[in-house]
Image (cartoon, rainbow, N blue to C red):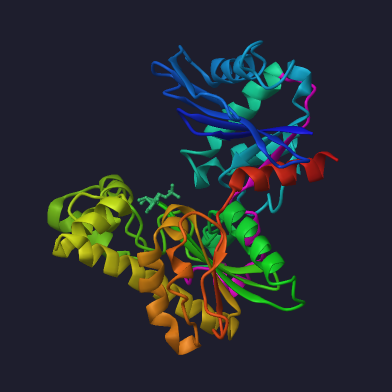
Amino acid sequence: MNVLVINCGSSSLKYQVIDSVTEKVEAKGLCERIGIDGNFTYQPAGGEKEESAKPMPTHNEAVSFVIEALTNEKTGVLKSLDEIDCVGHRIVHGGTNLTHSYVVTEEVVKEIEDCADLAPLHNPAHVLGIRACQKLMPNTPMVVVFDTAFQQTMPAKAYLYAIPYKYFEEDKVRKYGFHGTSHMFVSQRALELMGNPEHSKLIVCHLGNGASVSCEVDGKCQENSMGLTPLDGLVMGTRCGDIDPSVVEFLNKKHGLSVEEILKIFNKESGVYAISDGKSDFRDIAGAAEKGDERAQLALDMFAYRVAKYIGSYVAAMNGVDAICFTAGIGENNGMIRKMICDYLTFLGLELDDEANKVIGDEKLISTADSKVKAYVIPTNEELAIARETVALVK
Ligand code: AMP
């Protein structure tokens, strides 16, 4: 089956066509600046990347360009639209009611709209993407896969905030956790690599520009470091992660900043970007630290320390751990950060294999044969996870 995987933002649309049998990407690309001036990229497997300015006033035009490129006589990978067997949409927030993946129906779309207050930047854009695809492919089955679904197995003691219960009951204020599709993909792959043991305790560190840690007992998620929104938890590229909520009141009183202004600072101007004085890419930060920039070094130290603290707390939450997995841009590619994190974990009997830890971007066991806890690098593949879910539901 050919699965079109769509990841829609308010002004962008990422797409991939995946062959569900070979699990190979046949083509991929990106529509950017939707509603502004429109920029389109398309790359067939093994072919040249094409980029062009294309007017895209709405997501409808963006999806039309995607289909046009995929079925183009010369560079397309499909003969016609009919060769798209199903569409899988990535959706950020499923609230409390959308707890797994679903075939798209009007009721499901309404639920996605109903929890838009929990993800106001994302869910309305996802609905635009679904509508645009429905318009052009009215008979093609579609599936929605939620970033919050994998975390639905978290127990109440993990997901509740200790604030008046009515805010949970009436307003659904709770921890949801994010990057669920990635945590699911990586934890399932880790279990395969471990020979699918009957009982297992895993920790997955998704370390990218956005970053989160999760833990899984017997494959079921118990905890995720993100919260009601993706702002919570680790120190990230530009997000602050854990912070005393009273800082909001303090900054408001001291500088007259509004809640919106403070949240913008927490989301866009904080994290390693703030500590390193203006760098959010770990390659730049590591380069500066190497040249003796103390603030860049402090940013790396804070990042690794926070990840290690979360791992430690999750080991306590699960009363043990069998394997720790690293994924996403930093987790897959930056051996120095992996080592900084693992150096905090020798008390667990985790022994890093320094040679294996040189790996960049490939799947690898990076702990020694004697290590009491395994450590893996497992490249994430959210699009493939969405394609698998889509085919499973459509079938
Ligand atoms: P992501 O959000 O998963 O795309 O991850 C982005 C982060 O991964 C950035 O901070 C990058 O510096 C880091 N990253 C990506 N590729 C590499 C690489 N080859 N070496 C080191 N860091 C990398």
- For the C terminus, the quadrant is top right
Determine which quarter of the picture holds residue 254.
Answer: bottom left
Q: Residue 130 versus residue 378: which sits nearer the camera?
A: 378
Place of residue 210 in the rendered image (x, y in percent of width and height, measured from the top left)? 42, 52
274 relative to 301, above or below: above
- For the N terminus, the quadrant is top right
User: In the figure, is residue 55 to the left or right of 337?
Assistant: right
Task: Give the magenta part as a residue range.
Answer: 137-163
**Res. 20 in view:** yes
Place of residue 315 in the rendered image (x, y in percent of width and height, measured from the top left)? 53, 81
User: In the figure, is residue 316 to the left or right of 130?
Assistant: left
Q: Residue at x 68, y 72 (%)?
A: 194
Q: Residue 340 versus residue 11: which sits nearer the camera?
A: 340
386 relative to 162, above or below: above
Q: Residue 208 versus residue 362: which sits nearer the camera?
A: 362
Q: Residue at x 60, y 73 (%)?
A: 202
Place of residue 303 in the rendered image (x, y in percent of width and height, measured from the top left)? 33, 65
57 relative to 385, above or below: above
Q: Residue at x 51, y 47 (%)?
A: 118
User: In the figure, is residue 98 to the left or right of 264?
Assistant: right
Give yes or no for residue 268 being in the magenta stretch: no
Determine which quarter of the picture holds residue 185.
Answer: bottom right
150 relative to 340, above or below: above
Furthest residue in direction right, as rendered: 395
